[in-house]
Amino acid sequence: MPLPNTLSSLPRAELIAGPTPFHFLERFSEAVGVEVWAKRDDIGAVSLAGNKVRKLEFLLGDALESECDVLVTTGAAQSNSARASAAAAAVLGMDSVLILSGVEPAQPTGNLVVDRLVGAEIRWAGDVGWDRLNELVDEVASELEAQGRRPYRAPVGCSSPLGALGFTAAWFELTDQLSEADLHPSAVYHTSTSGGTHAGLILGRAWSGSGPAVRGISAGKVQDDPVGHHRGLALEAAGLLGLDDLEVEVSVDFSWIGPAYGVPTEASDAAIRLLARTEAILCDPVYSGKGLAGLIGDAPSMEGPVVFWHTGGWHALFHPPFTGSLLAR
Ligand SMILES: *Cc1c(COP(=O)(O)O)cnc(C)c1O
């Protein structure tokens, strides 16, 4: 199904070369006892890999159209979203300011190495929550405006309604690949936190009126009411397309988070090792490993085939605190 006009006519910065690969995971499927296919959003240039790039295509399309010259965004110290944002800004000739929680480490690791290399200005926010980080985006943007700059604001995870539309477009990309493979999966699994990925996909499903169920596996509750938040995000995104009476179905499983966001679990470590040993595909302990653990947990009751939407995040494997338990076995 071609991308509907209202979506394809929105300004979009081209950051992804074409559809991301979609393929069968033969050895992994055998190991988990269900037919699993992978949608490979983990693939891309090191700096521009992962699910945030899809949201950035729409956000930065808008930023360029508004003639903004500096991107202001935020996240955790190891934020994939902040890293991809800084990289995308560099590619498009914009500056970037990243407001990261925590304090500056003695030695940059993982995503921070990329942030520094692509020339982002980093401001350390100390130990603050997501709401405060989003407020800081506004404060820093106002400060830049006062200096005559034209800042573009992107929230935690780039999960604004416009950003979520990146995953509505992605839904149509996947359904094209499913038709081509003549595949009818029962569900698409992906990791969820700030909600843009889930909101965009459930909007795509509601709009196209058919297709596999969308199952989010939460890697952390970053809103008080994530289900209400994600539904609101999907409906606001629908509003941007002039779609007013769609019924979206939020489906997020919160049972795989473990002790907290960013804390590896035994199940995610085992999932990461299994996918690496069977397919040499790398997931991370903060996000995609937890999503994969959720898929493996549901496998006994699944009617295959299913799709694992690999949202990326493997950069965190090069941040030693996340990898200790993973490599200890
Ligand atoms: C941000 C992120 C997610 C979650 O996506 P949201 O749209 O924020 O819910 C999943 N996986 C990885 C690797 C991420 O970086």
Image: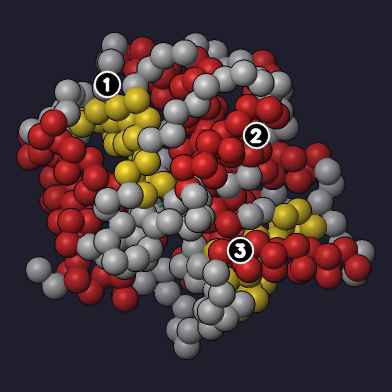
**Residue 178 spot, x, y in % from top left:** 35, 18
Residue 96 percent location from the top left of the image: 69, 62
**Badge 1 amino acid:** Pro
Q: Report, in whole angstroms, how far the alpha carbon at label 1 lies from the one at label 3.
A: 37 Å
Q: Residue at x 81, y 51 (%)?
A: 68
Mark identifier at residue 236: 2
Depth check, mark 1 against mark 3: the one in front is 3
Answer yes or no: do the residues labelled 3 and 2 have beta carbons within 8 Å? no
* Label of residue 185 in the image: 1
Is residue 91 toward the left or the right of residue 256 in the image?
Answer: right
At label 2, the amino acid type is Glu
Numbered mark located on residue 293 in the image: none
Where residue 109 appears, x then y in whole percent? Answer: 42, 74
Mark 1 is surrounded, within 10 Å at the Cα level, by few (under 14), some (14 to 19) or many (20 or more) other residues, namely some
* Local crowd size for mark 3, using a 10 Å CA cut-off: few (<14), some (14–19), many (≥20): few
Earlier residue among tags 2 and 1: 1
Residue where numbered disc 3 is placed: 131
Identified by mark 3, the residue type is Asp
Residue visible at 27% across and 61% down in the picture: 258
Among the 4 quarters of the image, the one containing residue 174: top left
Is residue 5 or residue 133 the one in the foreground? 133
Q: Secondary structure at mark 3?
A: helix
Between the residue at mark 2 and the residue at mark 1, the CA separation in whole angstroms equals 28 Å
Q: Of the residues under marks 1 and 3, which one precedes in the sequence?
A: 3
Instruction: Say whether marks 2 and 1 touch (CB < 8 Å).
Output: no
Q: Which of the two discs, 3 and 2, labels the residue nearer the N terminus?
A: 3
